[in-house]
Image (cartoon, coloured by chain):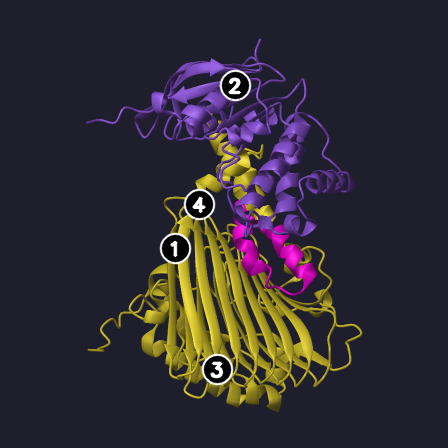
């Protein structure tokens, strides 16, 4: 009963097909890349935008949510670059080497390419594709699942992104920060990045996405991340898009043996967000921390979908995703841990928790375990609930005003996830972002109650 | 005028009347004990004074330092100097005890128009107060009451009281679940704070605590009203004779 019934294309699907037809000749890359783009678009066109009957996209029906497809963003002009100069404030004063992408295109003059550490090689993807870099061609698309609609669209339309390689044994002290900024046009940006961290290397990689409020731009960003044996990698993604942005992003990573890998997703922006993670633990003895926090209000919709695939034995993974949902926000977490037949002694624990600050907010939590090995320790849990009034009263009875009491309890709720970030500066910056979100909320609440009583 | 003045107070919870015309006046510097059988309304009195939402006053009035208590939010009552030591102190995972103490202290200072305490001053204050109560520094770094024993939780309540320096402290069965050593530590903590400007309402089921915190006045609460008031000897009398004469009538 898998008959494809709905072949009627939506406006967005039609626009995407037109866009691809018009753009494919001027998108970067040689014939081999062009052939890949065509294949990827055909793959997308077969099924169209994902909808609720596709299990992985059950809660994020892009057919319904994506009313139109924006035109491809044009290269940023001087004005766009000027507007992008202030970007990155979400992360405070964090000292990092920035690679800045404005409207999906690398901007060298806003980036910091000076005095590269030994063992660090980086450059823009568009250039690598144009020059026919064989390593890039060989690695691109190896990790991102071909049958995922968002990935297929990204492969078909990818314009630019970062290509980074960290050599064996190199320790890169300064975090690398891929900063993606939308300058303010209602346009679409497709970025693809490729990061290879060789054996025993150490690096911290930050991806942040931001743009102006009230502009309905669209972002599709993908990162393929190769983590070598014994490497230590911390990855943080901050999705702080503008209020009307549609953001779909993918992390596809393969992690070698005896590695330490942490990834953290921080979502506070965008009107529709899909954050997908495809993680493969390929080598034995690796420890992975997979965490995230979503702070959603108004009618924001954010979906984090995770596949953590334990392929090799003796790995440990900890998955923890927390969301705070206010107003009519909708938070979704779908997490699947797969333990393959040879992944004996796997130790995996997944927890997802939603805190509902409003009766109209909605949380969907779907943790799943799929286990084919017989000697493993796996578990999962999910909770959803409101703030505890008893705790709030206890704080108020000590003189703490209600808004501050709520903020304390929300911070405490999120702390368990945020504490998983090893880099102190980044951890502090995100705690600060949470505090900003909470103070914006309480000043709004304050105005609201003043209006109600006045 | 009394610091706390309760007149003909009626309080309902879930539509059931628990306090049925309670009168009480506590002057500055006095320690009042309120004793009574289970279900007589002791904890209800504690909660309604602190401002817990579900406890709804339906008649009567309460004045605290001349102000109508029911026009004040719970946090305003706390800042005005009213403190409730909870019978069951709550655990707050993720909030470090130090952070909690500091936020509370500074919130109250701010409300009263005083400057916030500097970090060194604050730490010094907490160290002194906690040392007297036998609370070690390790406990202060842990989340509020998480993993604390019953006795540690009660000592933590007294620590909060010592830091916040209230004008009226209501101790709701602070003795329950304490062994004799913990009881002495808690009682010493209270006695150190006694003074001409500070009053206490000590709610307890047993006379035992009153050997250590000697009250000026003892009240018997039964069926939602104060039915007898006397000196400290009243507590001993209750200990000897029990609450039988004040018990609820058991319906046949």
Q: CA distance from mark 3 to mark 1?
A: 32 Å
Give me the chain letter of mark 1.
A
Quadrant of the rendered structure where residue A418 is?
A: bottom right
Q: CA distance from mark 1 to mark 2?
A: 59 Å
Q: Residue at x 26, y 73 (%)?
A: A7
Give me the chain letter of mark 3.
A
Q: Nearer the viewer, mark 3 or mark 2?
A: 2
Q: CA distance from mark 4 to mark 2?
A: 52 Å
Residue A425, magenta (yes or no): yes
- Judged from the image, the secondary structure of the residue bearing numbered disc 1 is strand
Q: Quadrant of the N terminus of chain B?
A: top right
Question: Badge 2 is on which residue?
Answer: B233
Asked if badges 4 and 1 are on one and the same chain, I answer yes
Q: Nearer the viewer, mark 1 or mark 2?
A: 2
- Judged from the image, the secondary structure of the residue bearing numbered disc 2 is helix
Label 1 crowd bin: few (<14), some (14–19), many (20+), radius 10 Å: many
Q: Is residue A14 left or right of residue B63?
A: left
Quadrant of the rendered structure where residue A9 is?
A: bottom left
Residue A154, magenta (yes or no): no
Question: Badge 4 is on which residue?
Answer: A357
Q: Nearer the viewer, mark 3 or mark 4?
A: 3
Question: Badge 3 is on which residue?
Answer: A345
Colour in which chain B is drawn: purple
Q: Residue at x 49, y 33 (%)?
A: B173
Q: Compare residues B109 and A228 and report the one nearer the observer.
A: B109
- Judged from the image, the secondary structure of the residue bearing numbered disc 3 is loop
CB within 8 Å, label 3 to label 4: no
């Amino acid at each position: 009963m898998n008959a494809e019934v709905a072949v009627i294309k939506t406006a967005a699907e039609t626009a995407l097909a037109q866009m691809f037809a018009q753009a494919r000749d001027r998108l970067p890359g040689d014939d081999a890349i062009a052939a890949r783009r065509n294949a990827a678009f055909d793959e997308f066109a077969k099924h169209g935008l994902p909808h609720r009957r596709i299990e992985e996209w059950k809660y994020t029906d892009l057919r319904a949510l994506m009313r139109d497809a924006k035109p491809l963003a044009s290269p940023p002009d001087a004005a766009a670059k000027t507007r992008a100069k202030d970007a990155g404030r979400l992360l405070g004063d964090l000292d990092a080497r920035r690679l800045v992408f404005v409207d999906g295109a690398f901007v060298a003059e806003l980036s910091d390419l000076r005095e590269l550490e030994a063992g660090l090689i980086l450059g823009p993807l568009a250039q690598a594709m144009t020059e026919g870099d064989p390593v890039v061609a060989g690695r691109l698309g190896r990790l991102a699942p071909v049958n995922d609609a968002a990935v297929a669209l990204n492969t078909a339309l990818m314009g630019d992104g970062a290509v980074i390689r960290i050599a064996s044994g190199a320790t890169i002290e300064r975090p690398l920060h891929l900063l993606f900024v939308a300058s303010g046009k209602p346009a679409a940006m497709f970025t693809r990045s490729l990061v290879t961290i060789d054996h025993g290397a150490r690096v911290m990689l930050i991806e942040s996405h931001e743009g102006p409020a009230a502009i309905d731009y669209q972002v599709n960003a993908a990162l393929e991340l190769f983590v070598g044996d014994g490497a230590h990698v911390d990855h943080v993604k901050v999705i702080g898009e503008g209020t009307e942005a549609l953001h779909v992003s993918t992390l596809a990573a393969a992690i070698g043996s005896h590695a330490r890998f942490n990834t953290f997703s921080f979502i506070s922006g965008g009107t529709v967000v899909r954050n997908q993670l495809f993680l493969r633990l390929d080598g034995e003895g690796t420890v992975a921390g997979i965490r995230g926090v979503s702070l959603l209000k108004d009618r924001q919709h954010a979906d984090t979908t995770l596949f953590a695939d334990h392929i090799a034995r003796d790995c440990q993974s900890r998955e923890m995703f927390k969301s705070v949902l206010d107003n009519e926000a909708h938070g979704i977490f779908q997490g699947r841990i797969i333990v393959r037949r040879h992944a004996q002694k796997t130790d995996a624990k997944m927890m997802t928790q939603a805190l509902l600050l409003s009766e109209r907010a909605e949380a969907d939590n779907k943790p799943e375990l799929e286990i084919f090995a017989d000697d493993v320790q796996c578990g999962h849990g999910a909770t959803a609930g409101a703030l505890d009034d008893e705790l709030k009263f206890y704080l108020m009875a000590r003189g703490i005003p209600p808004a501050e009491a709520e903020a304390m309890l929300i911070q405490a709720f999120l702390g368990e996830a945020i504490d998983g970030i090893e880099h102190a500066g980044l951890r502090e910056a995100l705690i600060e972002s949470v505090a900003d979100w909470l103070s914006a909320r309480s000043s709004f609440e304050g105005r609201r109650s003043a209006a109600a009583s006045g | 005028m009394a610091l706390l003045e309760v007149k003909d107070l009626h309080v309902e919870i879930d539509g059931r009347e628990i306090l049925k015309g309670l009168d009480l006046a506590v002057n500055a510097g006095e320690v009042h004990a309120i004793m009574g059988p289970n279900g007589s309304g002791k904890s209800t009195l504690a909660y309604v004074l602190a401002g817990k939402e579900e406890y709804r006053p339906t008649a009567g009035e309460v004045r605290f330092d001349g102000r109508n208590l029911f026009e004040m939010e719970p946090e305003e009552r706390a800042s005005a100097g009213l403190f409730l030591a909870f019978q069951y102190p709550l655990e707050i995972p993720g909030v470090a005890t130090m952070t909690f103490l500091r936020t509370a202290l500074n919130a109250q200072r701010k409300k009263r128009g005083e400057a916030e305490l500097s970090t060194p001053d604050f730490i010094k204050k907490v160290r002194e107060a906690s040392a007297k109560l036998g609370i070690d520094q390790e406990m202060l770094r842990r989340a509020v009451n998480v993993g604390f024993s019953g006795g540690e939780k009660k000592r933590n309540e007294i620590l909060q009281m010592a830091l916040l320096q209230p004008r009226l402290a209501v101790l709701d069965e602070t003795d329950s679940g304490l062994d004799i050593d913990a009881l002495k530590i808690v009682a010493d903590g209270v006695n150190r704070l006694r003074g001409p400007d500070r009053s206490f309402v000590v709610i307890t089921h047993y006379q035992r605590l009153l050997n250590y915190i000697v009250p000026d006045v003892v009240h018997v609460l039964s069926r939602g009203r104060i039915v007898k008031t006397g000196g400290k000897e009243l507590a001993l009398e209750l200990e000897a004779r029990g609450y039988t004469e004040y018990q609820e009538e058991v319906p046949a």
